[in-house]
Image (tube, grey):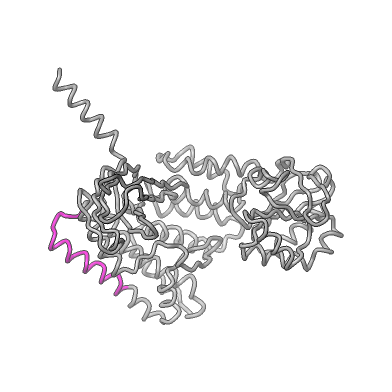
Amino acid sequence: MRTLFFILFAFFLQNAHANVAYVTGRIKNATAGERVELYIPHHYIDNEASDYKVELNNALQFEIYAQVTEPQIGFLLYGQDQITVFLEPGDSLFVKADMFQFPLGVEFGGKAGANNKFLREFSKIQLLDYNEFNNVRFKVGQWWFPLETPVNETMTNLQRNDFIGWANEQQQSAFKAYDIFMSEHPNALSTGFREWLEAEIIFQRAYHLLMYGAVYKNRYQLTDDYFDFLSEIPMVVNALGSEAYRQFLQVFMAFKQTKAGADGEYFAGQYQLAGNVLEGKPLAWVRSEIIRMAFSSDHFREILPHYLDFLRNSTYPEYESKLTALYERTSRFAPGMRTPPFAGKDVFTSILFSNSSLQGRVIYLNFWASWCGACVKKMDFFKEFSTELDNAGVTIINISIDENETFWLDALAETRYSGYHILAKTYPEQALAATFGVDAVPQYFIIDAQGNISQKPYSNQPNEIMTRLLQVAKGK
């Protein structure tokens, strides 16, 4: 009986820690009380990230118990520096460092020690850069995809065959380093790390080749046979923690749907396409991302039937939570829904207004910020047509989400944009951005003369928005 109890107790402990990674370490020459952080981005699962913050104890040691559900990378931060670490469920990682040598002089131990030793060397030869501010972005279809700045520079300087050769050489050098380490340290790397690493190598090449073809096709006059490499790429692998794999799947769907040229069904078309080329967990993840992007891009009605299909048929509920909150927020502002009440006072004229006082006019509710370049360009455009819009019965309300009121006022003083101007964080407009679920800009809403949310144009280009505003003003 006692034996059975201990077996059950051990089983309970094992499963209780199945999705936990234990990270501990010591930083020599540091000061007790200094902060160490472990940041684990898992947006691809639930639109969230975990940030574990601890302080060094008197022995200059720290320990962190982190939730990890997929083998993936995280970032260990100390002071102004960080190191990339690889963790998987059930891992233990010991980090030994010196304050004066961090992040260069770091040693790894524990169950995940070998994985991270090789990752450190691998990152040097693969030019891995996880800082999105060091990337440039290009639009494929209706979405934006990143490219590392050095890779983009290589793309702009190499013709087709030379770029293919460069991409192949990058992959070959990565696999060569991998093979050498495996021959010198057989069985040192975990299965989860090997699957992740192989996916990173394979799909980094595939992603770069596909982005080259999608972005620079016209520049280099690429013919369709350039994309023959896609037939050699495995579409279904067990490595969703690999950012390279996820990025490839997304740009592949966007590229294929754009090439099909099905206007008006961009996201719905990708949802169907995913079912033709994927299965299992990768299919569930891709479809969850397509739904998320559609909700975020105001294509609620287009994707709604597929969202309901996803909830009914997906066997991977871990991807549902990131969609539920978006659905609840987006559905409140779907076309035809009644606009929630709002009010404000223009900063220049002190005129009080509300959606009820503007009944009978079309409202262009524009959320922006002084630091948002895309927002400013759009507002410059609308300034030119302010008289035409006003005569057509359109009122522009600009709500800034600036935290710094001075920056906002300086931007307005430099260029007096059309319409009313209010700051979201000041009374009585304090809850306005939250009311409309705005946490990023540019964002806007069109409210018809009856006070209902109106359908937005498929494109978010300023001229398309203006055309739609004039249509709504005419009752179309």
Q: Is residue 229 above or below residue 188?
A: below
Q: Residue furthest right?
A: 391
In front: 365, or 22? 22
Question: Residue drawn 25% across and 51% down?
Answer: 26
Snapshot quadrant of residue 464: bottom right
Check residue 182 for magenta coloring. Answer: yes
Q: Where is residue 110 in the image (x, y as percent from the top left)?
A: 20, 49
* Percent x, y of residue 50: 41, 46
Between 233 and 208, which is closer to the camera in this rendering?
Answer: 208
Residue 394 occupies quadrant: bottom right
Residue positioned 78% across, 61% down in the render: 418
Q: Can residue 236 be seen in this view?
A: no
User: What residue range appears in magenta?
Assistant: 168-189
Q: Where is residue 431 in the image (x, y as percent from the top left)?
A: 67, 43
- Classify the position of the N terminus by image quarter: top left
**Residue at horizontal 52%, vertical 40%?**
324
Q: How many marks?
A: 0
The answer to whether residue 420 is left or right of residue 249 is right
Direction from residue 476 to residue 21 in the image, left or right: left
Is residue 433 something that shows in the picture? yes
8 versus 360 height, above or below: above
Residue 250 drawn at (x, y percent)? 45, 58
Tell me the residue at 26%/71% (across/down): 172
Magenta stretch: dominant SS? helix
Q: Nearer the viewer, residue 13 or 215?
A: 13
